[in-house]
Image: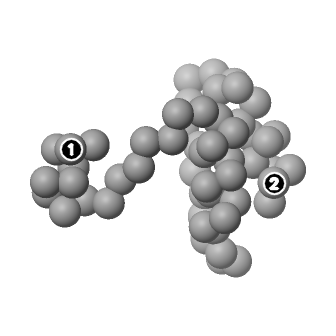
Amino acid sequence: MADLGARNVAARHLPTVDAIVDEVAREVREGDLVVIMSNGGFGGIHQKLLSAL
């Protein structure tokens, strides 16, 4: 995070799946495309995000 900040790259660390879902649900706007890249179920993020939206 510090390295990215030093390069003026906006980044956040969200420690849990629920925190990620909450943040994405707050920020996404109509017409946005959300891509979830994971090698597994990642704590149910797919369904949690669909439900939140």
Q: Are marks 2 and 1 in contact (CB under 8 Å)?
A: no
Name the kind of residue labelled 2 in the image. Answer: Ala
- Position above or below: 18 against 25: above
- Position above or below: 33 against 29: above
- When asked about the image quadrant of residue 36, the answer is top right
Name the kind of residue labelled 1 in the image. Answer: Ala
The kind of secondary structure element at disc 1 is helix
Residue 49 picture location, percent across and down: 75, 48
- When asked about the image quadrant of residue 7, the answer is bottom left
Q: Residues within 10 Å of mark 1 (few under 14, many from 20)?
A: few
Q: Residue furthest right?
A: 51
> Considering depth in this image, is 21 or 37 the residue closer to the camera?
21
Q: Which mark is residue 2?
A: 1
Q: Please name the residue shown 21% across and 54% down the image.
A: 5
Q: Is residue 12 left or right of residue 14?
A: left
Q: Please name the residue shown 66% across and 64% down the image.
A: 26
Query: If the image is split into quadrants, where does the N terminus sit?
Result: top left
> Considering depth in this image, is 10 or 32 the residue closer to the camera?
10
> Considering depth in this image, is 50 or 22 the residue closer to the camera?
22
Q: Residue furthest bottom?
A: 30
Residue 8 picture location, percent across and down: 19, 62
Q: Residue furthest left?
A: 6
- Measured Cα–Cα span from mark 2 to mark 1: 30 Å
Q: Is residue 52 left or right of residue 45?
A: right
Q: Nearer the viewer, mark 2 or mark 1?
A: 1
Q: Please name the residue shown 60% across and 67% down the image.
A: 27
- Position above or below: 8 against 14: below
The kind of secondary structure element at disc 2 is helix
Query: If the image is split into quadrants, where does the C terminus sit?
Result: bottom right
Q: Give the residue at mark 2.
A: 52
Q: Please name the residue shown 68% across and 47% down the image.
A: 21
Q: Residues within 10 Å of mark 2 (few under 14, many from 20)?
A: few
